[in-house]
Image (tube, rainbow, N blue to C red):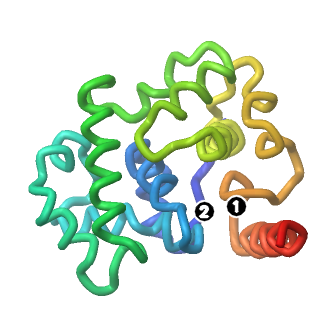
Amino acid sequence: METAVRITQQPDADALLTRSPLALLVGALLDRQVAAERAFAGPMAIARRMGREDLDAHEIAQYSPSDFAALLAARPAVHEYPAFMARRIQELCRFLVARYDGRAAAVWEDADSGGRLVRRVGELPGFGRQKAQIFTALLGKQRGVRPDGWREAAGAYGEDGVFRSVADITGPDSLEKVRTSRQGRRRTTS
């Protein structure tokens, strides 16, 4: 069952994540070395700076790289590393245009197994195995994308009732639980 995404705790940004598969992918791509809610608010900031209500993979893919980097770097910067992330977002959009005619949802719409879904997401520029598993868990838990074996393919991120990743953020309380869980894991690995 598809539900409204509530990762950023900002109604407009969460509404964009809910209606736009590309925004959800871009948010996941930005979820690196910044707080999850900041990363997933990035697509709304990008859309607004482009003068749009939504993101379009074709438009982003064709954007001048220097202009797109400047768009992400404008204050407040969309990410700690705006030029690097601008390049990654454009790589992602070019891949989506070449492979899926710019349709982000096509990555998962006909995935017939959890393993295939993780593989497809993992093929995206900027998505390694762990990010692919987290995104698969996010799709399964919050977007109703549940091919056979999706929980197993998502690994520990697919488990029910845990607060391990962005896939488990559904509001302010779960956001705090995920933060606490991440901090605990960092302490045990240090």
Contact flag, marks 1 and 2 (Cβ < 8 Å): yes
- Residue 116 spot, x, y in % from top left: 61, 19
Secondary structure beneath label 1: loop
Viewer-proximal residue, 85 or 149?
85
Q: Above or below — where is 156 with respect to 88?
A: above
Secondary structure beneath label 2: loop
Read off the residue under disc 2. 6
- For label 1, the crowd category at 10 Å Cα-Cα, with few meaning under 14, some 14 to 19 and many 20 or more, is many
**Residue 9 appears left or right of 69:** right
- Residue 107 spot, x, y in % from top left: 46, 27
Viewer-proximal residue, 138 or 144?
138
Q: Residue at x 38, y 45 (%)?
A: 22
**Residue 140 appears left or right of 177:** left
**Residue 31 appears left or right of 138:** left
Whether residue 70 appears in this view of the structure is yes
Q: Above or below — where is 31 with respect to 141?
A: below
Q: Residue at x 20, y 71 (%)?
A: 71
Q: What's the amino acid at mark 2? A: Arg
- Residue 2 spot, x, y in % from top left: 62, 40
Viewer-proximal residue, 110 or 53?
110
Disc with the residue nearer the chain's start (1 vs 2) = 2
Q: What's the amino acid at mark 1? A: Ile
Q: Quadrant of the N terminus?
A: top right
- Residue 33 spot, x, y in % from top left: 55, 70
Whether residue 2 appears in this view of the structure is no
Viewer-proximal residue, 124 or 52?
124
Q: Above or below — where is 74 with respect to 63?
A: below
Which mark, by number, is residue 169?
A: 1
Q: Residue at x 19, y 44 (%)?
A: 61
